[in-house]
């Protein structure tokens, strides 16, 4: 029987080799390498032979090495039948889609449609590059796009309905109370505890800030002068300026990817040495990841604006209830917006005021 491995000298290094990291890699290195390779070999982006299998292997390696207990088991025994997360390995595509928030944020933002749109746009781009489309083929492609858009629209409507119900339930601790100071403090404490947990998730801090901005701005817009805020017209102008800014940031991110991809293509034609090529490929991967996040953020904010409008314009409840929902939204948004990575949420709130 071969000797057992250790953390410094693992029984085998196949998973480390897959992620192209040393056996001493820390969590940040493991995550960075996974993201880079997952983007490179994602089946919706990479149609080459073996890419899908490589993507699956990369996902499996990351799921093991990112879990301290599984990593210790792997280092000691190598791959065996007991080496799997609880419930087994996640579907690679679903696992990749959870990079931004994952299950912890699902009740607030739902499932991102970004992945489906990214996949469809990539398929369209590939078919154009291959050429040879007939007019019938183009018509069929247009028809498929229309059907896909209808499908996405229906999914989005259902998503907004579900998220609106979730938000109403979330705010009910405050809206079902007498609205006094004690109720507000109890509600605030619940949100602080929640925020402390959520900020530890993948992109948790960034998502909390994005969600917090929408909740806060929508709550303040509804409250207006009566709630001690600026008139609604000024709130609307601020929101529109923010949307335009985020839209242009998203567009610029997509343009950066295109420019970087063209640089890689040119480098290959010019015979760039391997070291420079790898450096350039990493730069492209980072830009792709940044663009994926920006697209996700833009989608999340757009969805939550519709969710907040649904909750605050709900005519099935009295205006007093809608007003209390706006107060609660403003409070939740204020907390989320000011969460910091290395400080307790309660400490940052003392110093921050909208």
Image (tube, rainbow, N blue to C red):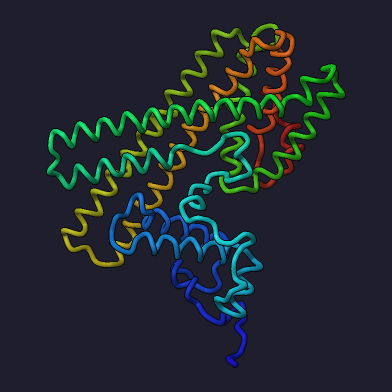
From the top left corner, tell me how far across and down residue 304 is, in percent.
55, 27
Going 61% across and 90% down the picture, which residue do you hit? 3
Snapshot quadrant of residue 174: top right
Q: Quadrant of residue 233?
A: top right
Q: Residue furthest right?
A: 182
Q: Is residue 333 visible in the rendered structure shown here?
A: no
Give the number of callouts.
0
Q: Residue at x 44, y 29 (%)?
A: 246
Left or right position of 288 against 34: left
Residue 43 drawn above or below residue 192:
below
Q: Is residue 174 left or right of residue 23?
A: right
Q: Position of residue 2 (x, y in %)?
A: 58, 91
Residue 126 drawn above or below residue 168: below
Can you see residue 251?
A: yes
Foreground residue, 318 or 259?
Answer: 318
Q: Which residue is depicted at the point 63% across and 43% down?
A: 104
Quadrant where the C terminus is found in the figure:
top right
Residue 336: percent from left, percent from top? 66, 33
Q: Is residue 14 above or below residue 260?
A: below
Quadrant where the N terminus sits is bottom right
In front of the other: 161 or 224: 161
Across and down, in percent, residue 353 comes to: 70, 25
Query: Where 229 sits versus 107, above or below?
Result: above
Residue visible at 36% across and 56% down?
40
Of residue 96 and residue 337, the one placed in the foreground of this image is 96
């Amino acid at each position: 029987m071969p000797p057992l491995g250790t953390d410094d000298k693992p029984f085998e290094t196949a998973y480390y080799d897959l992620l192209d990291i040393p056996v001493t890699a820390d969590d940040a290195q493991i995550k960075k390498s996974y993201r880079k390779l997952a983007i490179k070999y994602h089946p919706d982006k990479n149609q080459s032979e073996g890419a899908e299998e490589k993507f699956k292997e990369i996902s499996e390696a990351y799921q093991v090495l990112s879990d301290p207990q599984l990593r210790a088991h792997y280092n000691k025994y190598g791959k065996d039948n007991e080496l799997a997360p609880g419930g087994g390995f996640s579907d690679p595509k679903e696992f990749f889609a959870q990079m931004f928030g994952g299950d912890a944020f699902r009740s607030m933002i739902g499932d991102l449609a970004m992945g489906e749109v990214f996949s469809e746009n990539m398929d369209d781009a590939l078919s154009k590059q291959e050429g040879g489309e007939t007019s019938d083929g183009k018509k069929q492609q247009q028809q498929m796009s229309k059907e896909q858009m209808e499908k996405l629209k229906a999914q989005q409507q259902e998503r907004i309905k579900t998220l609106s119900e979730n938000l109403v339930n979330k705010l009910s601790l405050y809206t079902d109370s007498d609205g006094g100071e004690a109720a507000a403090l109890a509600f605030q404490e619940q949100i602080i505890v929640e925020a402390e947990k959520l900020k530890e998730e993948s992109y948790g801090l960034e998502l909390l800030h994005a969600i917090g901005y929408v909740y806060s701005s929508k709550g303040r817009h509804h409250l207006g002068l009566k709630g001690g805020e600026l008139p609604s017209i000024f709130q609307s102008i601020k929101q529109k300026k923010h949307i335009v800014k985020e839209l242009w940031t998203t567009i610029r991110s997509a343009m950066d990817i295109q420019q970087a991809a063209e640089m890689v293509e040119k480098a290959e034609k010019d015979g760039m040495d391997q070291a420079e090529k790898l450096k350039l490929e990493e730069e492209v991967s980072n830009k792709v990841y940044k663009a994926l996040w920006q697209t996700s953020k833009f989608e999340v904010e757009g969805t939550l604006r519709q969710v907040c409008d649904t909750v605050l314009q709900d005519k099935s409840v009295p205006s007093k209830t809608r007003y209390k929902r706006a107060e609660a939204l403003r409070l939740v948004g204020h907390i989320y917006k000011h969460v910091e990575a290395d400080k307790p949420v309660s400490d940052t709130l003392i110093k921050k005021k909208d």
